Image (cartoon, rainbow, N blue to C red):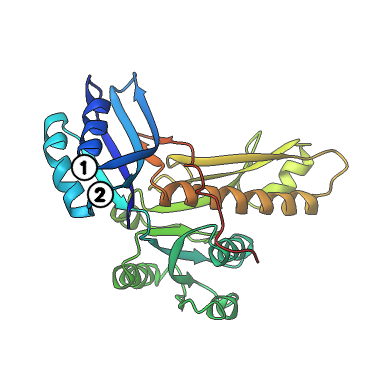
Amino acid sequence: MNSFTLRVTCASTRGIVAAISGALADADCNITDSAQFDDTETGRFFMRVSFRSEGAATLDSLRADFAPIAARFGMEVEITADAVKKKVLIMVSRFGHCLNDLLYRWRIGALPIEIAGVISNHMDYQKVVVNHDIPFHCIKVTPDTKPEAEAAQMRIVEETGAELIVLARYMQVLSDRMCREMSGRIINIHHSFLPSFKGANPYKQAYERGVKLIGATSHYVTADLDEGPIIEQDTVRVTHAQSPADYVSLGRDVEAQVLAHAIHAHIHGRVFLNGDKTVVFPPSPGSYASERMG
């Protein structure tokens, strides 16, 4: 394990980049990719550095090396080994397009994660999940059993050591408590239209209004439904000649892509929370490469 990622957040001031690059050089490390952002509105500084050890540096030694710098600048510092995959728990209901897409990307190595399990409130995808040698947990949810269901879900999170929950079209609203406990560690996906449509059958509403752009938004989950910090968005064009069923099919495609890209950004440490917004740095070279095909 000689490749690492460094994440830094602190108040903006002079000398931060010099201190970081100097510490890495002193530790016999070579920077392979670097991105930074200075938010002039909030006075916050964000930086992500990919680097490779060319000596005997370890996670423990690197963290010890950066402790004085973190204290000096009041930094929040995170250093991770790139070879260690994040544990992810996927939650799904009855729409399987995002789940199936994530399983394929995981299988070919395009999403280098460890899927700790899949939770669903239905049995529809049990066979698909189990055939991938992934634990499947069916936890039924009703208005009367919602607290017990969430307690069971959180037990699975704790038992598996899951670092991220992905709502792959999980059609249940999470409680404020669960959102707070997992703040910055739950990613959701939903459709997005211009203009916006809510309620039953939004794709039909969009079709009836002659919408020309449909899309998807992936964001961190907060207590404000579908209003958490945005990680990734994309759109696809539609025309007057397409049917409501076309809208649904195209919408599912863009949802799956946007969710996968948001997860990719999160697991590679490219996303920083910045108040109600996010800072999302570009992917490092080679980070989209797959281990195998098919």
- Which amino acid is tagged 1? Ala
Q: Are marks 2 and 1 in contact (CB under 8 Å)?
A: yes
Look at mark 2 in the image and give the residue it sits on: 55
Q: Could you tell me residue 253's position as x and y percent?
A: 68, 52
| Farthest-out residue, right | 241
Q: In this rendering, which labeled residue sits more in front, label 2 or label 1?
A: 2
Q: Which mark is residue 8?
A: none
Q: What quarter of the picture does the N terminus occupy?
A: bottom left
Q: Name which of mark 2 and mark 1 comes first in the sequence.
A: 1
Above or below for 184 versus 280:
below
Position of residue 284 in the picture relative to residue 290 (left or right): left
Position of residue 77 in the picture relative to residue 236 (left or right): left
Residue plotted at (66% across, 39% down): 235
Q: Residues within 10 Å of mark 2 (few under 14, many from 20)?
A: few
Above or below for 134 versus 94:
below
SS at mark 1?
Answer: loop
Look at mark 1 in the image and give the residue it sits on: 27
> Which sits in the foreground, 185 or 38?
38
Place residue 95 in its image quadrant. bottom right
Distance from the alpha carbon under mark 2 to that under mark 1:
7 Å
Residue plotted at (56% across, 57% down): 290
- Which amino acid is tagged 2? Gly
Q: Residues within 10 Å of mark 1 (few under 14, many from 20)?
A: some
Above or below for 282 versus 93:
above
Q: Could you tell me residue 108's position as x and y percent?
A: 57, 64
Position of residue 50 in the picture relative to residue 173 (left or right): left
Residue plotted at (25% across, 23% down): 12
Q: Could you tell me residue 264's position as x and y percent?
A: 49, 50
- Evaluate whether residue 215 shows in this view: yes
Q: What quarter of the picture does the C terminus occupy?
A: bottom right
Q: Could you tell me residue 135's position as x and y percent?
A: 45, 78
